[in-house]
Image (spheres, rainbow, N blue to C red):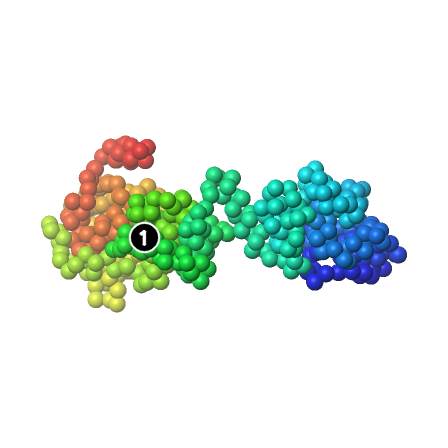
């Protein structure tokens, strides 16, 4: 039978219990193989209980020292009770100087003490007992998170200045660099906020007019990585030039913020209408605007488009790609059956094939004759330009988007040379 003898407000600080008449210190730490918290206990004496009741500092110090033993037990091992018991007298009953000396010899959980108000500077100097002068029973997890974040930065050789830290707090990335950034002016010291806003303004001016378009090759809500990289490079260069004292972390979080916002705007906007963006003219050297097209993917799924419908051909095609594109479905075809021409987009290779009917099949059973040509494509923007040109002017309008190669071996050599760069 177990009875609680003494517990503090925080449920994680070790509790004193009585089991079958014996006093035990009980604490939760680590996790078992099912990721459920483990509970460890070890015996204490009445004198230890008296100190634990009256002295929060020594109680927290004992907890900090026992936690590494719990971690060493792993998911199913036993707590080293002898080692745990050996900590009781030196921490609970010894002079403060002796406690400091002990903590210089044993492993202990620094973050736990910081969470409960320890002075980080004194901890770093080995003045453990004095560092706990302002200790609180209430935990402040953010203090420990900030400490660990700064330690990770220090391990990379990064030391934040006041403005660097303020910028990271503004974007919400002070603790975790992988967090999606956002604008949090209330997290910044009001005295530093004007400087932060000047940095943000520099970034906004640098990328004015740039956009991050969608990339339906990677799904309906995916955006173009090349556009992202272009915007990030532009913002980084402008911010470094205008504010040379900022560390890399601060510069990157600003470009991450602007790129994330641009991507989100693109995801929430209607599918891009490339034909409207290109204007209302017909491609020079091409035939009239397409009136009927057939879209197919590598799985044999087909979709028809007719002029006069609610959406343009390019918008309809890219939505088709966004719905159907996958790792095993990266070849899409746009065909004008009436004109006997079409293009095939190979997303896995950043390339395109255009096929033009040179001679139709005859009544005598002879097969039609086709001209097949290949070209490399420069990313998503290249695909958009090609599709728009084809819709507005057919295969003839694609001449200026070459060079086009009729020899497949020549094309493969060109592709290998490009990919090797």
Q: Name the residue located 62 percent from the left edge and 51 percent from the top edge.
A: 118
Q: Is residue 366 left or right of residue 413?
A: left
Task: Judge whether residue 381 can be spotted in this image.
Answer: yes
Q: Is residue 70 above or below residue 17?
A: above
Residue labelled with disc 1: 203
- Quarter of the rendering occupied by the N terminus: bottom right
Coordinates of residue 79 in the picture (x, y in percent): 76, 45
Coordinates of residue 140 in the picture (x, y in percent): 60, 57
Coordinates of residue 388 in the picture (x, y in percent): 21, 54
Q: Is residue 67 left or right of residue 120?
A: right
- Quarter of the rendering occupied by the C terminus: top left
Q: Name the residue located 60 percent from the left edge and 50 percent from the top edge.
A: 119
Q: Residue furthest right?
A: 21
Q: Residue furthest left?
A: 285
Q: Quadrant of residue 53?
A: bottom right
- Which is more toward the observer, 360 or 411? 411
- Which is more toward the observer, 359 or 366? 359
- Which is more toward the observer, 35 or 72? 72
Q: Is residue 282 left or right of residue 420?
A: left
Q: Name the residue located 72 percent from the left edge and 40 percent from the top edge.
A: 102
Mark 1: few, some, or many residues within 10 Å (few <14, many ≥20)? Answer: many
Q: Name the residue located 77 percent from the left edge and 55 percent from the top edge.
A: 52
How many numbered marks does the figure carry? 1
Task: Judge whether residue 263 can be spotted in this image.
Answer: no
- Which is more toward the observer, 36 or 14? 14
For label 1, the SS is helix
Coordinates of residue 277 in the picture (x, y in percent): 21, 58
């Amino acid at each position: 039978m177990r009875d609680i003898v003494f517990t503090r407000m925080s449920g994680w600080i070790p509790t004193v219990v009585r089991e079958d008449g014996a006093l035990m210190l009980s604490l939760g730490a680590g996790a078992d193989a099912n990721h459920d918290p483990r509970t460890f206990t070890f015996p204490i004496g009445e004198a230890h209980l008296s100190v634990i009741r009256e002295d929060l500092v020594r109680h927290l110090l004992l907890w900090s020292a026992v936690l590494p033993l719990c971690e060493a037990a792993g998911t199913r091992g036993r707590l080293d009770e002898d080692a745990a018991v050996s900590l009781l007298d030196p921490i609970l009953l010894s002079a403060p100087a002796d406690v400091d000396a002990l903590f210089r010899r044993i492993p202990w959980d620094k973050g736990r003490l910081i969470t409960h108000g320890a002075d980080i500077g004194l901890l770093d100097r080995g003045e453990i007992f004095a560092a706990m002068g302002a200790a609180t029973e209430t935990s402040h997890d953010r203090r420990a998170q900030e400490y660990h974040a700064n330690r990770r930065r220090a391990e990379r050789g990064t030391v934040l200045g006041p403005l660097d830290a303020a910028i990271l707090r503004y974007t919400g990335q002070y603790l975790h660099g992988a967090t999606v950034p956002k604008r949090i002016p209330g997290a910044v010291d009001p005295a530093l906020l004007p400087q932060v806003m000047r940095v943000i303004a520099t970034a906004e001016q640098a990328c004015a007019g740039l956009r991050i378009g969608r990339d339906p090759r990677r799904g309906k809500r995916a955006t173009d990585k090349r556009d992202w990289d272009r915007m990030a490079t532009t913002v980084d260069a402008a911010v470094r030039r205008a504010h040379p004292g900022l560390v890399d972390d601060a510069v990157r979080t600003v470009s991450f913020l602007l790129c994330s916002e641009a991507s989100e705007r693109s995801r929430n906007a209607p599918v891009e209408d490339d034909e409207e963006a290109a204007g209302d003219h017909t491609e020079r050297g091409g035939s009239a605007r397409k009136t009927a097209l057939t879209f197919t993917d590598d799985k044999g799924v087909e979709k028809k488009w007719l002029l006069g419908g609610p959406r343009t051909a390019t918008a309809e095609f890219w939505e088709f790609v966004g719905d159907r594109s996958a790792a095993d479905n990266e070849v899409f075809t746009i065909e004008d059956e009436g004109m006997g021409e079409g293009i095939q987009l190979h997303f896995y290779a950043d390339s395109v094939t255009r096929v033009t009917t040179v001679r139709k099949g005859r009544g005598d059973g002879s097969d039609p004759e086709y001209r097949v040509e290949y070209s490399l494509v420069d990313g998503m923007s290249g695909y958009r330009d090609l599709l728009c040109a084809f819709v507005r002017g057919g295969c003839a309008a694609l001449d200026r988007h070459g060079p086009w190669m009729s020899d497949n071996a020549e094309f493969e050599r060109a592709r290998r040379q490009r990919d090797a760069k």
